[in-house]
Image (cartoon, rainbow, N blue to C red):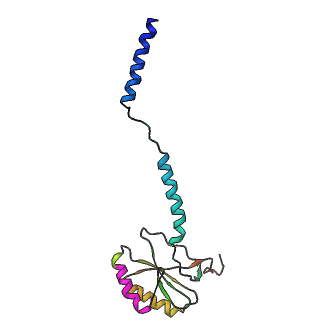
Amino acid sequence: MVGSVAQSKPRAQRGRRRGKHRAMMAEINITPFVDVMLVLLIIFMVAAPLLTVGVPVELPRTSAEPLPSVEEEPLSVSITAEGQISIMTTEIAMEDLIPRLRAIAAERIDNKIFLRADGRVPYQTVAQVMGALNAGGFNDIGLVTDTGGPALDGQTE
């Protein structure tokens, strides 16, 4: 009996010490981290479709491969079937195109720009806009088309 009393006292003392001084926690609770990451994933999944340019253009079809993606958000100029020009989603007049492009080029790192022209737009208009893009400081012009058009061998994809 003496041995059992002696053993119970140190346990009681240890219990009291833990109540006064809390020991450091060695485990990391990752549940809040996972919750935040899932919420961010949902936000990005909902926001991603809203980031595309919203000017309705019927692009010509070609068999060209897509260009590799770039680090900076790509700048896009669109020409509608009616000849209206838009930088991203902002409609502008042809006379304002070069000054606006120069202002944008001064703020950008990359001089790459994508030209989206409706297939019914005359080639003369497309060439004039390409000249304005070059005069505005954008030398790397990518023409945006839809896939599935005729290839050079006469077959469609």
Residue 61's x, y, as percent? 60, 81
Looking at the rendering, the stretch of residues picked out in magenta corresponds to 91-105
Residue 60 coordinates in the image, percent (x, y): 58, 83
Q: Position of residue 45 (x, y in %)?
A: 54, 63
Q: Is residue 78 covered in magenta?
A: no
Residue displayed at 58% across by 90% down:
120
Taking the spot 54% from the left edge, 87% from the top edge, the residue there is 80
Q: Please report the residue visible at 36 percent of the width from the left and 87 percent of the height from the top.
A: 99
Front one among 115 and 63: 115
Choose between 126 and 90: the one closer to the eye.
90
Image spot of residue 56 (x, y percent): 56, 82
For the residue pair 2 and 28, the one nearer the viewer reads as 2
Left or right? Give the position of 118 relative to 103: right
Q: Is residue 94 magenta?
A: yes
Above or below, comparing residue 11 to residue 25 in the picture: above
Q: Quadrant of residue 148?
A: bottom right
